[in-house]
Image: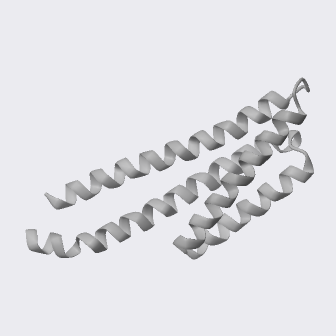
Amino acid sequence: MKAETEQNAENDKKERERIDKLNQADSLIFTTENFLKDNGDKIPADKKAPIEGALQQLKDAHKSADIAAIDSAIANLNNIMQAASQQMYQGAQGQPGADQALSGLHVVSALVAEAVCLAERVATFVHSYRCY
């Protein structure tokens, strides 16, 4: 039984990584959609359109379950969100409602990092459970 576990370890690792990446993408899609729904009216159109485009790119990659495309789309969305939050922060200091929108951008970034960490812990637990 232990030999069988060792033989399947590499396949299990690849499958775990695939599932983790899909879960990470799903979580980022969910939090970004909620952020846009709650704060869309506070985000200037020139900053909202790139976020929506990157979100659609991530949705398409998630739907196709293409891990390389998911990685690229996640990085792209994170970069766009960070750039948008920096621009909004610089341009919106003192404007009503700006603090809430910026806070939402920071929450999305924090939730993505937390989801990745949680997915890694769950995957480690599942893998260790299978081996024993």
Residue at (85, 34) in percent of width and height: 90
Residue occupying image coordinates x 13% and y 57%: 132
Instruction: Report the side of 7 relative to 106 (left or right).
Output: left
On screen, residue 16 versus residue 113, left or right, reads: left
Q: Residue at x 63, y 43 (%)?
A: 109
Whether residue 58 sits left or right of residue 111 in the image: it is right
Question: Does residue 1 appear in the picture of this structure?
Answer: no
Q: Report the residue at 49% width, 62% height from top.
A: 21
Percent position (x, y) of residue 87?
83, 41
Measuring from the top left, give residue 124's x and y in whole percent. 30, 53
The foreground one among 126 and 84 is 84
**Percent of width and height locating residue 3:** 10, 73
123 lies above or below 88: below
Residue 27: tell me if it is visible: yes
Corner quadrant of residue 101 = top right
Q: Quadrant of the N terminus?
A: bottom left
Q: Is residue 88 above or below residue 4?
A: above
| Foreground of the two, 34 or 106 | 106
Camera-nearest residue between 12 and 72: 72
